[in-house]
């Protein structure tokens, strides 16, 4: 189960976007690079149960610090939520810099048996009915932003990130 937890967390973290900035690199003004993205997955520190900290390199090209106050990324099969990676604490991302960020998360499973069955489908390449939903709230300066993207096909997420099913299979060997 621990291996399943780590792989799901890595895949969900990686799906959010990868670019090519270096840690500590100053970014141009927000007008030139006004986005926030995950640069790379740096690691995972396992906590109690199905909780832990994702260690990510994150770039913030905005003109203000951003605080992620709530977040959930869920893996769905058809109309059913199989598991959700939930933010368990607030995350601060400094403005106009690439920095390491510790993201406290917990994995919630609707049913460990169902999650294992879905994991088996992923390993067999049967991902047509599997989707991802992102639901989060962030605060930047005086502005609050609700982010919601529903039912993104897992195949599309993996392709966008350049992650093959073979690479996922290799993570669990």
Image (cartoon, rainbow, N blue to C red):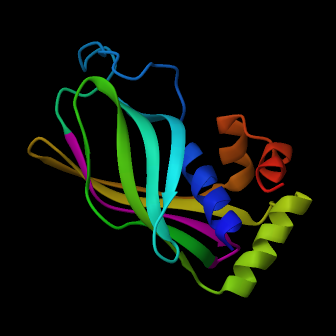
Tally of numbered discs: 0
Residue in view at x 26 percent, y 17 percent: 31
The one of 138 and 78 positioned closer to us in this rendering: 138
Q: Residue furthest left?
A: 142
Residue in view at x 60 percent, y 77 percent: 81
The one of 102 and 148 positioned closer to us in this rendering: 102
Q: Is residue 79 left or right of residue 96?
A: right
Residue 102 is inside the magenta segment: no
Residue range highlighted in magenta: 66-80
Q: Horizontal and vertical percent for residue 123?
A: 85, 60
Q: Is residue 169 left or right of residue 104?
A: right
Residue 74 is inside the magenta segment: yes
Q: Horizontal and vertical percent for residue 95?
A: 22, 29
Residue in view at x 52 percent, y 39 percent: 42
The one of 132 and 114 positioned closer to us in this rendering: 114
Prevailing secondary structure of the magenta residues: strand
User: Which quadrant would residue 15 be assigned to in this image?
Assistant: top right
Q: Quadrant of the N terminus?
A: bottom right
Q: Horizontal and vertical percent for residue 11?
A: 63, 51
Q: Is residue 130 above or below residue 143?
A: below
User: Which quadrant would residue 173 be assigned to in this image?
Assistant: bottom right
| Residue 20 shows up from this direction | yes
Residue in view at x 51 percent, y 77 percent: 49
Q: Is residue 60 left or right of residue 44?
A: left
Q: Is residue 90 above or below residue 35?
A: below
Q: Is residue 36 left or right of residue 91?
A: right
């Amino acid at each position: 189960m621990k291996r399943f937890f780590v792989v799901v967390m890595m895949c969900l973290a990686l799906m959010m976007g990868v670019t090519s900035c270096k840690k500590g690199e100053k970014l141009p003004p927000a007008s030139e690079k006004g986005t926030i993205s995950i640069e790379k997955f740096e690691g995972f520190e396992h906590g109690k149960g199905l909780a832990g900290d994702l260690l990510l390199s994150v770039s913030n090209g905005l003109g203000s610090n951003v605080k992620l106050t709530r977040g959930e990324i869920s893996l769905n099969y058809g109309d059913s939520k199989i598991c959700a990676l939930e933010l368990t604490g607030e995350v601060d991302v400094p403005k106009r810099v690439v920095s390491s960020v510790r993201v406290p998360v917990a994995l919630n499973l609707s049913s460990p048996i169902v999650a294992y069955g879905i994991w088996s489908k992923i390993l067999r390449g049967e991902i047509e009915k599997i989707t991802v939903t992102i639901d989060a709230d962030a605060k930047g300066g005086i502005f609050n932003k609700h982010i919601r993207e529903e039912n993104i096909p897992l195949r599309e997420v993996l392709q966008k990130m350049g992650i093959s099913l073979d690479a996922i299979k290799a993570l669990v060997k």
